[in-house]
Image: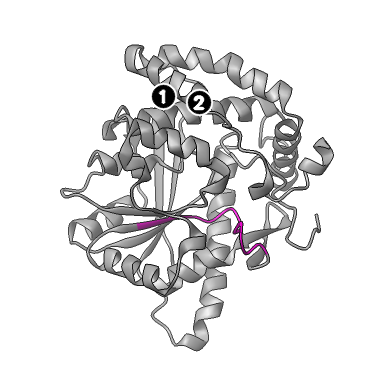
Amino acid sequence: MEEAEELLHWSDQQEVVSSNSPILFLFRLLVVLPAWLVSFFVLPVGFFYMVSSRPARNEARLYQKQLRAYFGRGVPKRISPFLQVLSFSLCIVEKIEGWMGKVPFDKIIKHDDDVGALISQLEAGRGAVVIGSHLGNIELLRSLSSYDETGVGRNVPVTAIFEMKSTEQFNKTLCAINPKAGFNVIDPGDIGIETISVLQEQVERGGLVVFAADRTSARARQRCIREEFLGRLADFPYGVFLLAALLNAPTYFMFGLRTKIWSLFPKYHIFIEKSQVDFHCPRSEREERILSLCREFVGKLEKYCRQFPYQWYNFFNFWLTSDGAQ
């Protein structure tokens, strides 16, 4: 049975957080205790999850071995499913902290990349598309924006396009903690012509539209782009890159990553890199540019997997393609 589970599409797997009780418990602890103390509770929880979940152990090991095969023996330094599960457990705490407003902007380490260009663009009232992944804290930008902690001198509306099915219980709990967590979240299955028009208007008004591009659609699994990722073919969601093309706005890749696996007073890197692909082109060229945008994203994903190997939170066989090949 467990072997069969390891061959499931990510959206068919059981939600990791199947009850809201543990999340609410962490929330209540964070209300009365400092985050560094709450982090100690995560150690036994992460260990128990790793021991009790064979798929999580196997898929973490598969991913880490693929990293090492692609980059060499030093990445990661050791094959350790526990470090990856522990990092995931800490990320859950960080998400709760973020939606509680406990991750101020001064805890974010910015870099000499394109963050300045994005801030300048937003300051000028022009919006953008942001493409992220499940490497690191995918919700860092949204939680910061809910408290106007973006470094921009105005409110920046953020609409997120995320598959909701696999984290339904967790998302409901975050909404109970901060109702803004549920605002402007659209399931890809609900997107139609009217939705695209609304998203275009938001970008024109200076807002952000945010996608995660490392999981294929739950409803259209065959509609994908197959690219080599860490030396093996993997499927990426065609719809994400098509929507970026239709919105035809400057596109940025964003990754929010913890500086260390474990720290009593953690800080976070935010990496923002502008895509070299634009869609101001004849329609006949659009398809090739969609493929180029996907290839560019995969390159960025590989880059940051190498730097932060244990912060990968896709606990499924990433190289199981839509036709069943591995």
Which numbered tag is attached to residue 266?
1
Q: How many marks?
A: 2
Q: Residue at x 19, y 62 (%)?
A: 125
Q: Do the numbered discs 2 and 1 sit on residues whose CB atoms are within 8 Å?
A: yes
State which tag comes first along the sequence, 2 or 1: 2
How dense is the environment of label 2, judged by Cα within 10 Å: few (below 14), some, or many (20 and up)? many
Tag 1: amino acid = Pro
The vertical placement of 151 against 234, above or below, is above
**Quadrant in the rendering for residue 256:** top left
Extent of the magenta region: 209-221
Above or below, 292 against 299 in this view is below
Given residues 303 and 94, the one toward you in this image is 94
Please give the name of the residue rendered at 61% of the width and 56% of the height, measured from the top-left corner: 218
Name the magenta segment's main secondary structure: loop
Name the one closer to the observer, 121 or 69: 121
Is residue 255 toward the left or the right of residue 104 in the image?
A: right
Left/right of residue 197 with respect to residue 41 in the rendered view: left
